Image (spheres, rainbow, N blue to C red):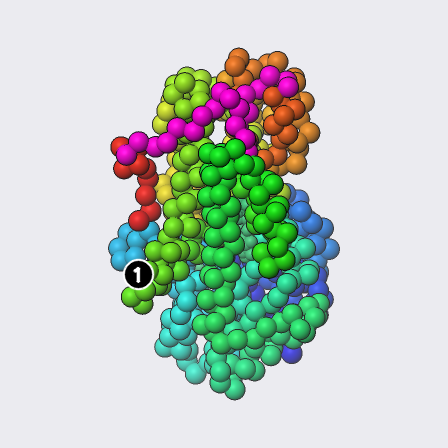
């Protein structure tokens, strides 16, 4: 019978997941622990550290009842029956596997702490995405320091998507639990299964061995990302031929074997998972000598980089006479998708950095991203975002060409062009006539999410570019020169 659960890491995964477990399992005490004092203070305040629809309600119902947020990780680890580990797994920036392999520093330090402070048997659950075979490494750390304590490591990957996390947790497509094929491993699987059985139907709980569970998470994210890169590749062809990607995607998605989800062409996928997980998969393939397989998945990331580059270079810069220096470009939306304030790997970072290299002045509006976060994102090096928040908290010197506003009308005032980079619903409702009247002419609008009706905006007077849709006569796709191609920032 599970009495207490502790989760190490109070982030986008740990926070919402534990809040829902606490709500659905009133007899279990759930504690979420983190090394970041600021994060824990925010979880205990009225202004939660992450924006997620429905989260506040769940936290308010359980906080102080059977849900607690604490920095005293050691105490709660020692008291817990089950320990979820949901810490950062950044992409390595140096050494072997740099740019692809996961850096397990934070995971290892969490495992060492568990081994040090545990006084009774524990089930340790991998929650954050980890490379395949991480469980084996964690088992080694735990058992070599265990003082006779029995540790069982389980893999229980999180499949929630930000923006819909609470609904995804309430009604999951599936819960996947992987463990050792030993009696101890099977018993641990059953114990965790009992926790989920409080609200998840039994036929949605899949049990597996550790490696299948770990690999399923990477594979699921790679498949989703691949769909986006595929639809984005077709969107480029639509622009070249005069076809419309929204029509093509609809027709393709009507095939029941394909389905309609994840077929929205965009400025490129972002988020903490897709790129990182594919890079992990690529590294795993390379380590097993599967270079052709590695190459196949690499292209999904390369296509995404191409898409982000193209929006900046071929559309914004080229259509504005190859000269955006000192021109004001308004950026509407900075988060990696709507209904989240998360900016990790958001396409907006690459587009903005591209425009800044061209010496444009940019004015950014996003309903849920702070100025501080935007400035930090635009000054941070690649892959640095995934280091614990307290390390990032030095104030960046603000990028001078960037202003951040709390209003779309303010951001677009006096601008030569607008780039819509996140599909926030409110961008569909803006008064574009008012925006147009306050802009420099000709007024350009680059819709990287297909949220506006291009025909209506053309009637107002805008020159409109919508991803994968028939172009304005003004806009003509200008292919990359070989020199441009060489200069493109590469992952590999
Ligand atoms: C993803 C997976 O969906 C989830 O199952 C996994 O557990 C974690 O990673 P998340 O990163 O929160 O979730 O967001 P998701 O909705 O998958 O979107 C990722 C990116 O793809 C966003 O930038 C989004 O805008 C983009 N996207 C998504 C598209 O460009 N087109 C689409 O059709 C769908
Ligand atoms: P995710 O999206 O996977 O939840 P986040 O970066 O949002 O990732 O959250 C990871 C959290 O883990 C951060 O708040 C970080 O401070 C925390 N963390 C990292 N290492 C440790 C550790 N050893 N002990 C406690 N918390 C940790």
Above-or-below relation of 201 to 42: below
Q: Position of residue 396 (x, y in %)?
A: 41, 34
Question: Which residue sits at x=32%, y=43%?
Answer: 490
Q: Position of residue 450 (x, y in %)?
A: 58, 35
Tell me if I can see residue 82 in this picture: no
Viewer-side residue, 283 vs 465: 465
Dot 1, how many residues are within 10 Å of its Cα: few (below 14), some (14-19), or many (20+)? some
Q: Magenta segment, which residues? A: 459-482
Above-or-below relation of 42 to 240: below
Question: Which residue sits at x=40%, y=73%?
Answer: 136
Viewer-side residue, 195 vs 39: 195
Asked whether residue 471 is drawn in magenta, I would say yes
Asked whether residue 275 is drawn in magenta, I would say no
Q: Which residue is mark 1?
A: 291
* SS class, disc 1: helix
Question: Which residue sits at x=62%, y=43%?
Answer: 339
Viewer-side residue, 427 vs 238: 238
Above-or-below relation of 28 to 351: below
Q: Is residue 293 left or right of residue 371?
A: left
């Amino acid at each position: 019978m599970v009495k207490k659960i502790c989760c190490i890491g109070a982030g986008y995964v740990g926070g919402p997941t534990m809040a829902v477990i606490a709500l659905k399992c009133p007899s279990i005490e759930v504690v979420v622990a983190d090394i970041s004092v600021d994060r824990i203070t925010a979880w205990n305040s009225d202004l939660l550290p992450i924006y997620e629809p429905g989260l506040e309600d769940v936290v308010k119902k359980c906080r102080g009842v059977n849900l607690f947020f604490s920095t005293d990780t050691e105490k709660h680890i020692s008291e817990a029956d089950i320990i979820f580990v949901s810490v950062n797994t950044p992409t390595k920036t140096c050494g072997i596997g740099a740019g692809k392999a996961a850096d397990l520093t934070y995971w290892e330090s969490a495992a060492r702490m568990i081994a040090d402070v545990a006084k009774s048997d524990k089930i340790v659950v991998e929650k954050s995405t980890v490379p395949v075979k991480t469980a084996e490494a964690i088992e080694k750390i735990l058992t070599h320091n265990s003082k006779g304590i029995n540790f069982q490591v389980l893999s229980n990957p999180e499949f929630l998507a930000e923006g819909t996390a609470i609904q995804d947790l309430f009604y999951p497509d599936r819960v996947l639990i992987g463990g050792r094929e030993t009696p101890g491993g099977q018993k641990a699987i059953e114990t965790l299964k009992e926790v989920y059985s409080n609200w998840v139907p039994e036929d949605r709980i899949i049990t597996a061995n550790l490696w299948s569970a770990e690999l399923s998470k990477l594979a699921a994210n790679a498949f989703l990302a691949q769909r986006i890169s595929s639809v984005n590749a077709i969107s480029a062809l639509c622009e070249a031929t005069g076809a419309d990607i929204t029509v093509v995607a609809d027709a393709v998605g009507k095939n029941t074997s394909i389905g309609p989800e994840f077929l929205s062409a965009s400025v490129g996928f972002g988020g903490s998972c897709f790129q990182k997980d594919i890079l992990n998969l690529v590294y795993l393939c390379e380590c097993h000598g599967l270079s052709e397989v590695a190459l196949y998945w690499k292209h999904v990331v390369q296509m995404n980089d191409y898409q982000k580059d193209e929006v900046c270079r071929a559309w914004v810069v080229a259509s504005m006479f190859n000269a955006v220096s000192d021109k004001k470009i308004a950026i509407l939306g900075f988060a990696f998708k709507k209904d989240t304030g998360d900016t990790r790997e958001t396409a907006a970072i690459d587009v903005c950095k591209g425009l800044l290299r061209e010496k444009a002045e940019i004015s950014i509006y996003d309903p849920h991203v702070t100025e501080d976060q935007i400035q930090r994102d635009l000054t941070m090096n690649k892959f640095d975002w995934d280091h614990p928040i307290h390390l990032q908290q030095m104030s960046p010197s603000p990028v001078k060409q960037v202003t951040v506003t709390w209003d779309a009308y303010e951001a677009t005032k006096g601008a030569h062009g607008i780039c819509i980079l996140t599909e926030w619903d409110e961008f569909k409702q803006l008064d574009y006539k008012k925006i147009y009247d306050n802009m420099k002419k000709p007024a350009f609008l680059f819709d990287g999410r297909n949220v506006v009706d291009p025909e209506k905006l053309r009637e107002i007077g805008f020159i409109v570019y919508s991803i994968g849709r028939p172009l304005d006569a003004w806009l003509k796709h200008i292919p990359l020169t070989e020199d441009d191609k060489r200069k493109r920032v590469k992952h590999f």
